[in-house]
Image: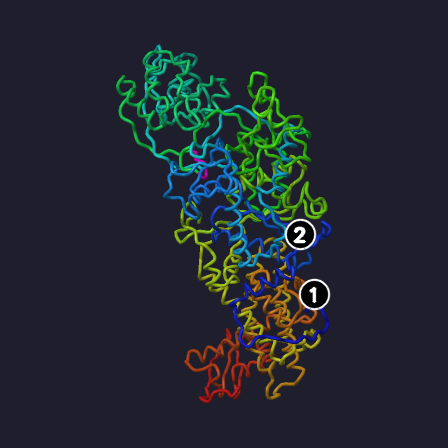
Amino acid sequence: MTENASIVAAVDAPDRVSLDGLETKWGTAWEENGTYAYELTSRENTYSIDTPPPTVSGSLHVGHVFSYTHTDVVARYQRMKGKHVFYPMGWDDNGLPTERRVQNYYGVRCDPSLPYVENFVPPHDGGDGKSIKYADQVPISRRNFIELCWELTAQDEAQFEHLWRTLGLSIDWKQNYQTIGAKAQKVAQAGFLRNLERGEAYQAQAPGLWDVTFQTAVAQAELEAREYPGAYHKIAFHGEAGDVVIETTRPELLPACVALIAHPDDERYQHLFGTTVTSPVFGVELPVLAHTAAEKDKGAGIAMCCTFGDLTDVQWWRELSLPLRSVLGKDGRILAETPEWITSDEGVALYEEMAGKTVFSSRKAVVDKLSETGEMIGEPENTNRMTNFFEKGDKPLEIVTSRQWYIRNGGRPYQEANGKELQENLLDAGKDLAFYPDFMRVRYDNWTKGLNTDWLISRQRFFGVPIPVWYAIDDNGEIDYETVLVPEESQLPVDPSSDVPVGFTEDQRGVPGGFAGEVDIMDTWATSSLSPQIATGWLTDDELFKATYPMDLRPQGQDIIRTWLFSSMVRAHLEFGENPWRHAAISGWILDPDRKKMSKSKGNVVTPLGLLEKHSSDGVRYWAASARLGTDAAFEENQMKIGRRLAIKLLNASKFALTMGGDTVEFNPAKITLPVDRAMVATVARVVREATAAFEAYDHTRALEVTESAFWSFCDDYLELVKDRAYNRDDQFALADTESARAALALSVDAFVRLLAPFLPFAAEEVWSWYAKGSVHRATWPVADPLEKAAAGQDESLLTVAGEALAALRRVKSENKVSQRTTYASVAMMAPKASHEQIEAVLADLRQAAHVRGPLEIGEGENIAISGYELDPAPAKN
């Protein structure tokens, strides 16, 4: 409206305004009218968003509402700026969380050796699984298990979509994907095969972190360091010059010991370097070596290197070329077969006692034996140590040796075609990505620099994207992992467990001269890292891909910079040589009343649907939008109450302002003639400029702050000041003066409705529908130039002075505890000399608004204040 010379519009406001029911009313209308549907256009006219695909394993919590609202206000702003907004939704439905939820929900577990059962009915349907022990879960085939995964994720996705629609996310629901869906599988498998062809993907038999509960390998990005109780044991190794005492928390790994290691500068052990010692009980001869990773001030300063107790052991093993002596299996138990390097009768007997036992039980066996032989010095000393856990696990990770698939990510040396190391290229790519806020960039840099291994992507699970390879089986029936059989891209997606490689038939599966399918699946991040390519139609929709990629925005949480953001940068760099998006908007965390991060694992989350019903979606969105990107925010229902009040005020004030001229309203900048009206429009023009600049800088909170502040000033000061002139019931004012107020009110309301639309979409749409066609969310963003032209150079400080004067007149009545409709028989106002002319300019409005019927004298004072007055007990008539 503000861009046009003059428009007269009919006003059809309800008798009573309310927020109740607006979510359903406008949610339905937006869907029916395709308000948020993406219209295919050129790349320069598109704004595309790489929406985070939420994990479909349970329920969303208020932290999701918080961060997804941040994205939505950006999408709504860009749409009003004239961009065709590509705003899809993905569902992250593969991986461990889904499998665990299915196990708990249905009371089942997967056993790939079992045959498929037609029309299988699970033993439970909706249970929480907490009372169902693992042993009591019914084993079912992999195919039956995957069918249940699909069934439950479909239910969860429907619930999630309902919540997102209620919140008012302006998503194009026709643009969606599942990370386990056919489209995502094709992209993920094609990406992997291209990595393999270029040498960026490889398999290796190597030590790796392993979760004994989930029975799967774990990548570096999935680690979580936690305190874990343990005990230091002082153990004596035997050397020619006497015993060497080490301290360890893992005595059960004594049979896997391959060396003792101390710092090369540690004077205590200089005489031992180059010599050997024998291990207690087991009697294995071991070298004493030097390495700078040994900590002189930790324990005895000399440590046993076992294969493997921790990641430092892996480092020593690699760099010192030590032998591999693994004794721990994938099940977390000591291997059954006695190792060949243990030859003493006492050592063999102890190992046989340990074999097949858990870490805890075997530790007790070793400690008891060392105590018996006198090779343990003193009693164990209890301690808490930082230990690596899988972020979703509850037992410390072990390090076992297994065959796994990796993708290069700069963690190990790898030179690219431009002559630079991959790590250096990824750091350079990070410099080209705009982070909001910018200080989040250091997290990307630190993670990239701190990697010490390539990205392990294979997982020993069931519900996920299969690694699309087979292996030849030699004539002896042994799988030849070096002979990898791959499909053509046109065949994708494939499942090696049921599909057959080119040139083979199904009856050749698992037989000499035939083939074996890869049984592992890809890490969920290996698919999610390609979300920009999946969403934009890479390999599935060429036109869409050209119009939307590289994307404009990656919104996400700060805690997954090391996983989702970094892995997405890796995949885009390896495939396209460019970043997958131009901007990264990083949300902070939601904190509970104790200032702790809200998370499902901590059990301190709040589910959002009740909040949306209680405070309205606009109220909850206001709370979320009040927090800046990258800043942690407290869960604060009072902020939601403030947001609800703002939304209600938008309805009430807009109706009040738009209906002062009856059932029509005229948007005509030329009719704004009085200084105070021009000052109001000048204020709106400034707010438009500041809010626009804030949005362009991805500072939605600043845009909300300046808009909200000006809107409340409009309601509390300007609207109250000019309402009598705008109504002009008794023709006390000249028609031109009345039309000036009405025009300023109309233009101001129209601008505020648009400015608040990204934040309060339901209330803004409701007001818009009273006087305009279509949707405010398809309307243009307000422009400052025509508003400034209508203000004709008027200084907006006039409105500030008028507001202070009106507040001073009201304050007297409040202090006297009388109605604001009480009239002044006379009043004396003090004000700085510089303000006198401004007060005179609004005197007529001040007298009407404050019901001053007698003299209103203005004297000189330091501040605007009432120095004398006489109240008339008779209330004003209007």
Quadrant (top left/top right/bottom left/bottom right) for the N terminus: bottom right
Amino acid tagged 1: Asp
Extreme residue in the top direction: 240
Colour logic: rainbow
Residue 363, quarter of picture: top left
Residue at the image position 69 percent from the left and 52 percent from the top: 46
The answer to if 433 sits in the magenta stretch is no
Q: Which dot marks residue 785?
A: 1
Query: In the drawing, does residue 841 fall left or right of residue 818?
Result: right
Q: Main secondary structure of the magenta part?
A: strand
> Residue shown at 73%/72% (left/top)?
5
Q: Residue at (63%, 67%) from the top-left corner? A: 751
Classed neighbour count for the residue bearing mark 1: other residues with Cα under 10 Å, few (<14), some (14–19), many (≥20): some
- Give the structural element (helix, strand or loop) at label 1: helix
Q: Point out the frontmost of discs 2 and 1.
A: 2
Q: Residue furthest front?
A: 118
Residue 208 versus residue 147 in the image, above or below: above
**Which residue corresponds to mark 2?**
47
Tell me which segment is drawn in magenta. Answer: 388-392
Residue 304, disc? none
Q: Please determine whether, in this image, residue 782 is positioned above or below residue 502.
A: below
Depth check, front residue: 31 or 697: 31
Q: Is residue 576 above or below residue 780?
A: above
Front-most of 542 and 123?
Answer: 123
Q: Three-letter amino acid code at disc 2?
A: Tyr
Tell me residue 615's x, y (percent): 47, 63
